[in-house]
Amino acid sequence: MIKKVSIVFHSVCGNNYLIANDFYNEFKNYDMDVNIYRIEDANYESLAEQFEVASQYKEEILKLQIASPEKLLDSDLIIMGSPTYYGNVSGAMKIFMDSFSTYWTEAKFWGKKLFSFSTSGNAEGGGDMCLNCINVFGLHMGMIPIPIPSNLIEGKNHTAYGLLHYVGDNSDKRPNEDTKTTIKAITKRLLTL
Ligand SMILES: Cc1cc2nc3c(=O)[nH]c(=O)nc-3n(C[C@H](O)[C@H](O)[C@H](O)COP(=O)(O)O)c2cc1C
C-alpha cells in the first residue's frame, strides 16, 4: 500500500514542473502524504533566461525544496520527471541519479515503486527513451517501475513507459486539460498499488 509519495522533477521551461505540480495536487486531493522536490541545477537561472516561458515559473520552482536521495528514503512511491534531452534525461537529472551511488551499493531503494514522466519537443523526439532511462535507473536501484498502458486509461493512446507530454518546438504547448485528465487517471491507478 502506498502511504508516502515523493515527486521529483527537473524543469527549465516549466512543463515538467506543471506536471509534477498536478500530480502533487492530485495526491493531496486524496489526503496523501506527498512532497515535491526540484532537482538542483547550477545552470538553472541562466538557462531559464534563454526561454521566454521559463521566467513565468522560475520563482515558483526556486521556492521548492531541493531533492536528495536521503529525502526520498521513506517514500513508498517516487514519481520522477525530466525533460527529454537528446533522447535521454537532462544532465541535471543524470547528476542527481549518479548521486545515488552509496544508496545503490546498500540497496536502500529496493522495493520502492517508481513512476516516470517526461516532456519532449515532439512525438518522434525520443521521449519514450527518456522515460526508459528513468525506469532503468529505478531498476538499478531495485525499484519497481510501474507501467500504466493505454488500455488502463479510457480513451487514451499513450506510451506504456510513463507519462509523456509533447511541448512542441517552442516549448510552450503546456500540459493542458487532456494531460490533467490523464494525470488524474494515473494517480487513481497508482493509489490502487
Ligand atoms: C538541450 C536540449 C535537448 C533537447 N533534446 C530533445 C530531444 O532529444 N527530443 C525532443 O523531442 N525534444 C528535445 N528537447 C526539447 C525538450 O524536451 C523540451 O524543451 C522540454 O521537454 C521542456 O521541458 P521543461 O519545460 O520542463 O524544461 C531538447 C531541449 C534542450 C534544451
Image (tube, rainbow, N blue to C red):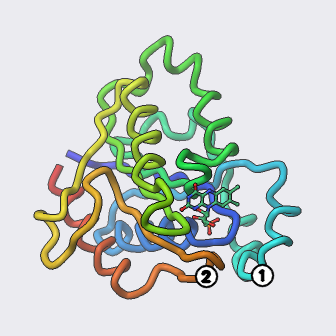
Between discs 2 and 1, the one toward the N terminus: 1
Q: Characterize the local packing of mark 2: few (<14), some (14-19) or many (20 or more) Cα atoms within 10 angstroms.
A: some
Q: Is residue 48 left or right of residue 73?
A: right
The residue singled out by tag 2 in the image is 172
Q: Is mark 2 within 8 Å of ligand 1?
A: no
Give the alpha-carbon distance from disc 2 to disc 1, as whole Å.
Answer: 9 Å
Report the residue that reaches farthest toward the front: 124
Question: Percent from the top left, x then y, of residue 21?
Answer: 50, 70
Report the residue that reaches farthest toward the bottom: 177
Q: Residue 65 falls in which quadrant of the image? A: bottom right
Circles 2 and 1: CB atoms closer than 8 Å = yes
Report the residue that reaches farthest toward the top: 105
Three-letter residue code for mark 2 = Asp
Q: Characterize the local packing of mark 1: few (<14), some (14-19) or many (20 or more) Cα atoms within 10 angstroms.
A: few
Q: Residue 100 falls in which quadrant of the image? A: top right
Q: Is mark 1 within 8 Å of ligand 1?
A: no
The residue singled out by tag 1 in the image is 52
Is residue 103 depicted above or below 47 in this figure?
Answer: above
Q: Residue at point 43% right, 66% down?
A: 123
Q: How many marks?
A: 2
Question: Percent from the top left, x then y, of residue 9?
Answer: 56, 55
Is residue 192 depicted above or below 168 in this figure?
Answer: above
Q: Residue at point 53% right, 52% down?
A: 8
Is residue 136 depicted above or below 146 in this figure?
Answer: above
Three-letter residue code for mark 1 = Glu
* The N terminus lies in quadrant: top left
Q: Residue at point 85% right, 72% down?
A: 49
